[in-house]
Each structure stands twice: as C-alpha cells, then as structure tokens.
Image: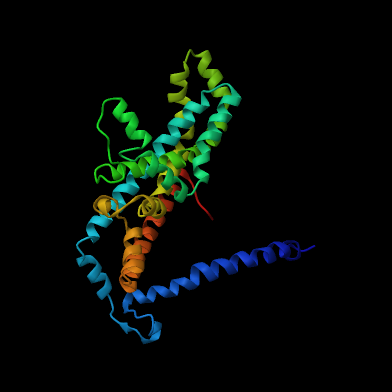
Amino acid sequence: MSIWKREMPLHIMLIPAVLLVFLFHYIPMLGNVIAFQNFVPVKGFFGSKWVGFDNFRYLILLPDTMQVLFNTLYIALMKIVAGLIVPIVIALLLNEVRMEFVKRGIQTLIYLPHFLSWIILGGILIDMLSPSTGIANLFLQWLGFKPIFFLGDNSWFPITLVISNEWKEFGFSTIVYLAALSGINPLLYEAAIVDGAGRWKQTLHITVPSILPIIVLMGTLSMGQILNAGFEQVFNLYSPQVYQSGDILDTFVYRLGVVDAQYSVATAVGLFKSLVSFLFVSLSYFLAYRFAGYRIF
C-alpha cells in the first residue's frame, strides 16, 4: 500500500478542522479593512469612506491610550513573572512529598480552579473580597487591619488581578514542571547522596539545573502573551472606578466598539495589538529556539 493511500483517511479527517479554521479565523481577517475606513454599517465595506491612517492617529491622540497600553503591559508582565515563579516553587515542593495519595490530592485541589470560567470565579471573588461582608476583609479586621476595597481601589486592583489569575492557573502550569521533574535521572540523586548532599543541595545542583531548559522555554514562549492581560478576567471584575489601573487593550476595544459604536477605531486598536503580538510571538519563538532548542517544524 502506498503512503498516499495509507494516509488518505487521516487527510480526510483533517478537512473539517481546516475548514473551521479558515471560516472562523482567516475570513474574519478581511474585516480589518474597516480600520482604514470611516465605517458605517448601513453602507458596508464598499460604501464607507476610506480615511487611511486617520483612525490610528485619532487613537494615539486619545488621552486614555497610553494609560491603557501601560496597564496592559504592567498587568501582563506581572502575570508572566508570577506564572513562572509560583508553578516552579509548587512543583519543587510537591516533588519532595513522598506520600503519593497526599501528592495526588494536592495536585487535584490546585488543578480545580483552572476548569472554572471567569464568570463563576468573578462572582466568587466579588463575594470573597467585598469590603463589608467578604471573608478576606473579615479576616483582615479580625487581625486588626482596616478593610481593603480590592476591586475598587486603583492601587490594589492590578495586584488582585495577578493573584486571582495565579490562583486559577498555577495548578495547571505545575503539570509541565512536574513532568520535567519526573524525567530527571534518579542515579544523579543517588550519586549526590553518596557525596553527602542534602535535599537542599540536591535541589540546587540537580533539580533546578535539570529543569532549567523547560523554564527558559516557558519564559520565552510567554512573551507572546505580553499584550494579553486577560479580557474575561478584567471584564468580569472591573468597574469604572478602576478604569485608571484596570482598563486594558481588550476591554478598551470592547468599550470603543460595542459600547460607543466606534467600529473603525476599535478595529484599529485590535489590529495594532495583533501586529505587536505577532512581533513578540516571532521573537519568543526565536529565543525559544536559540536558548532551549524548541521549534515547531
């Protein structure tokens, strides 16, 4: 049987997925043309007036644009840093647990939030962080501190976003590092024990260096998410009171496009974000290949 006949069923099975990607990912790209038009829905693409880069110039001159860009980068960078440190620490600690049922129980508990949507978690967090009846503030008052308006204070809102995002995702990210830890040759630890190394020195000189390539890989790939600060999370938790510190590019596009009906300007923001993200994704793949030997093809 030729290779073509043997692989024909696989190619046929691939057709629906390719069609779906083409229909819902490539054809909608044609809509980016309205970023260069004064788009009026009743006139459509062909009847609306072309304005060149006027929407981009208008966007740059908006007083909120630079603040929104800063918020996006600031929140995304904090999420990336926390998303690297917390899972590594938890994976190293779990790796030291010798009772398998305790280890699996902890893993299951920390994975659970990943499977909940931000709609559900948003409601839970709003109740937990309420300045009057939230369990977090009741605990702070019990310790003698003043209540904190976590979701209504501009200084606390970005920190709350990062911590709540990490609470949701660190369990799932830990899987990657636990998988890397399971691949370390146990003979290295036995040799270290013979040389008199304790658990701390084994961690420093064997465990961490062994998983360093996967740490570098995850760090460089996360650069592609530099402008993705998390629309669903911010949209479900923020309010006009914290626009100054919590409004990001995605929510800015939503308010311009859906709330204010400025379709062309909103598309210009989205196109700008896509171009910058493309550059960061390309750079991250280059760095991942350069320092960790990672490549798709």
The quadrant of the picture occupied by the C terminus is: bottom right
> Of all residues shown, which one is farthest toward the front?
133
The residue that appears at 72% across and 65% down in the rendered structure is 8
Query: Where's residue 161, x and y in %?
Result: 35, 45
- Residue 184 seen by the camera: no
Tell me what residue is drawn at x 50 percent, y 35 percent. 110
Image height of 170 relative to 246, above or below: above
Quadrant of residue 144 in the image? top left
Give the number of callouts: 0
Q: Which residue is drawn at 36% across and 65% down?
A: 270
At which x and y percent is residue 271?
36, 67
Q: Is residue 41 left or right of residue 7?
A: left
Please determine whether, in this image, residue 133 is positioned above or below residue 207.
below
> For this rendering, which residue is in front, 27 or 252?
252
Q: Nearer the viewer, residue 188 or 79?
A: 79
Image location (x, y in percent) of residue 157: 29, 45
Q: Is 100 left or right of 94, judged from the image as shown?
A: right
Asked whether the viewer can see residue 194, the reply is yes
* Residue projecting furthest to the bottom: 47
Q: Where is residue 181 in the image (x, y as percent from the top left)?
A: 53, 32
Query: Observer-nearest residue: 94 or 106?
Result: 106
Quarter of the image with the N terminus in it? bottom right
